[in-house]
Image (cartoon, rainbow, N blue to C red):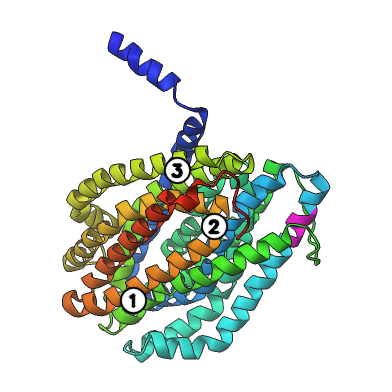
């Protein structure tokens, strides 16, 4: 009994900020589990219907190219927006509504610009990325691009609404990430033509649109602000946004080339390899979302609030503790996932056109991909600290270094290990990122007593 009482006393002495992070992480993990379960069902249905075929190759390639630029912008905007929206909470409601209305218009305009750019550059992108794929796969990818173009547009709107919810420490946006998967699942199961790419096109597009609509309604309820579309950029928050997004975007744009870079190297290995990498990446995505998404979304609002109040030392201490905790916990996750890999892949995919040989190939690739998990989990906490401090130049520089490491590792490891070299190179990149962020966090520059500026 005395031991139980001792544990209770220790729990009672935990700082409220740690409790907030832990509570938010639990909720996000639960929502991510639901969302990723829906994603797993979607992948099971695709594997059953198409297996490792040219339809899946075309879909994976098309989705990668369509979401590349928007996803890069979203990665930057989500990191920059949450601290800005946390600080915006202290402003008058009218000023908040004005900025949010301008932000909505910006998201739509930038998304449409990306779609137009993609439309005119698509033939050149296919020539570069799909040089060794069959002509049938290339033609199918062109058809998919026309139907899935709206996905890239609404991704930015989804990001804005999700950031509004996250700034209020409301994490239902994580739950709603299952909407595109559920809609796509419905289309794949209901479609009669087993070889048609149409359900992949319609399911993906309508799923993202529905997610954007739901997030728009819920974000308005969360912050009690009705933002009307505004075509001006006169809010005082924009100068900070320009500088922060501009600097961070350079590094993130370079870093985002890692996924197309993988597609480029894997496409050179012939048909079927892109699909194999895609299936393995999606199983890895289940782990990433359950841990990394939870801890990053739980820590960013808390760290932003501490730094907004000028408590840099406290924010840095919390970030370091959670980063090392995630590094240790993810090691346990890797061991368990390594042991369960064949069973999980078989359970998710092995039916219909997906054979036992495909299970062996995907399981092996997934196991090697686990190398990246500890570094990725740990780094994400430090990324939230840097974002809250406004240290976007440092983040951009680290991103550029990471891509250079990834490119060199891909070049050598794919030559030595084939498709396995792709995920090994990602692990090397993760280790490089961890060393960079930890070194800078522990450096003298991280001990400043006042909040860093936007740059």
Q: Quadrant of the N terminus?
A: top left
Residue 390 spot, x, y in % from top left: 58, 55
Residue that badge 3 annotates: 319
Earlier residue among tags 3 and 1? 3
Is the residue 341 above or below the residue 34 in the image? below
In front of the other: 162 or 415: 415
Label 3, label 1: how many angstroms apart (C-alpha)? Answer: 29 Å
Q: Nearer the viewer, mark 2 or mark 1?
A: 2
Q: What is the magenta range? A: 98-102
Instruction: Using the rendered view, name the quadrant where residue 437 is placed.
Output: bottom left
Q: Could you classify mark 3 by the number of other residues whose Cα lies within 10 Å: few (under 14), some (14-19), or many (20 or more)?
A: many
Residue at 38% x, 52% y is 438
Residue at 46% x, 67% y is 397
Residue that badge 2 annotates: 391
Q: Could you classify mark 2 by the number of other residues whose Cα lies within 10 Å: few (under 14), some (14-19), or many (20 or more)?
A: many
In front of the other: 452 or 357: 452
Horizontal side of 329 relative to 163 (left or right) equals: left
Is the residue 346 above or below the residue 112 in the image? above
Is the residue 294 above or below the residue 201 in the image? above
Earlier residue among tags 2 and 1? 2
Q: Nearer the viewer, mark 3 or mark 1?
A: 3
Q: Secondary structure at mark 1?
A: helix
Decide if residue 353 is in sight here.
no
């Amino acid at each position: 009994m005395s031991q139980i009482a001792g544990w209770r006393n220790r729990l009672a002495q935990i700082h409220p900020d740690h409790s907030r992070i832990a509570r938010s992480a639990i909720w996000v993990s639960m929502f991510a589990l639901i969302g990723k379960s829906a994603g797993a069902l979607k992948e099971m249905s695709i594997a059953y219907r198409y297996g490792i075929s040219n339809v899946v190759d075309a879909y994976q390639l098309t989705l990668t190219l369509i979401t590349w630029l928007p996803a890069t912008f979203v990665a930057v905007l989500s990191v920059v927006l949450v601290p800005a929206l946390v600080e915006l909470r202290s402003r008058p409601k009218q000023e908040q509504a004005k900025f949010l209305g301008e932000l909505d218009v910006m998201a739509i305009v930038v998304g449409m610009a990306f779609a137009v750019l993609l439309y005119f550059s698509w033939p050149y992108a296919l020539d570069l990325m799909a040089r060794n794929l069959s002509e049938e796969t290339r033609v199918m990818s062109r058809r998919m691009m026309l139907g899935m173009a709206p996905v890239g547009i609404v991704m930015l709107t989804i990001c804005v609404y999700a950031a509004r919810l996250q700034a209020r420490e409301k994490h239902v946006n994580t739950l709603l990430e299952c909407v595109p998967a559920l809609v796509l699942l419905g289309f794949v199961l209901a479609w009669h033509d087993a070889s048609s790419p149409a359900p992949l096109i319609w399911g993906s597009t309508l799923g993202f649109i529905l997610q954007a609509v739901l997030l728009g309604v819920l974000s308005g309820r969360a912050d009690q602000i009705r933002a009307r579309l505004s075509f001006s950029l006169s809010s005082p928050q924009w100068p900070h946004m320009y500088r922060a997004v501009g600097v961070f975007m350079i590094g993130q744009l370079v870093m985002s080339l890692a996924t197309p870079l993988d597609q480029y190297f894997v496409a050179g290995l012939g048909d079927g390899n892109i699909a194999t990498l895609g299936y393995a990446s999606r199983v890895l995505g289940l782990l990433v979302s359950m841990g990394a998404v939870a801890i990053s979304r739980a820590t960013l609002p808390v760290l932003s609030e501490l730094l907004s109040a000028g408590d840099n030392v406290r924010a840095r201490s919390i970030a370091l503790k959670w980063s090392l905790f995630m590094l240790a916990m993810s090691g346990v996750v890797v061991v368990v996932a390594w042991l369960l890999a064949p069973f999980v892949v078989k359970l998710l995919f092995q039916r219909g056109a997906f054979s036992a040989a495909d299970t062996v190939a995907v399981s092996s690739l997934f196991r090697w991909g686990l190398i990246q998990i500890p570094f990725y989990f740990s780094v994400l906490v430090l990324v939230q600290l840097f974002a809250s401090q406004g240290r976007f130049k440092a983040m951009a520089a680290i991103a550029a270094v990471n891509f250079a490491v990834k490119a060199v590792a891909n070049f050598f490891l794919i030559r030595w290990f084939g498709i396995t070299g792709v995920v090994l190179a990602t692990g090397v990149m993760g280790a490089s990122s961890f060393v960079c962020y930890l070194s800078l966090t522990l450096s003298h520059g991280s001990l400043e007593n006042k909040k860093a500026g936007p740059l």
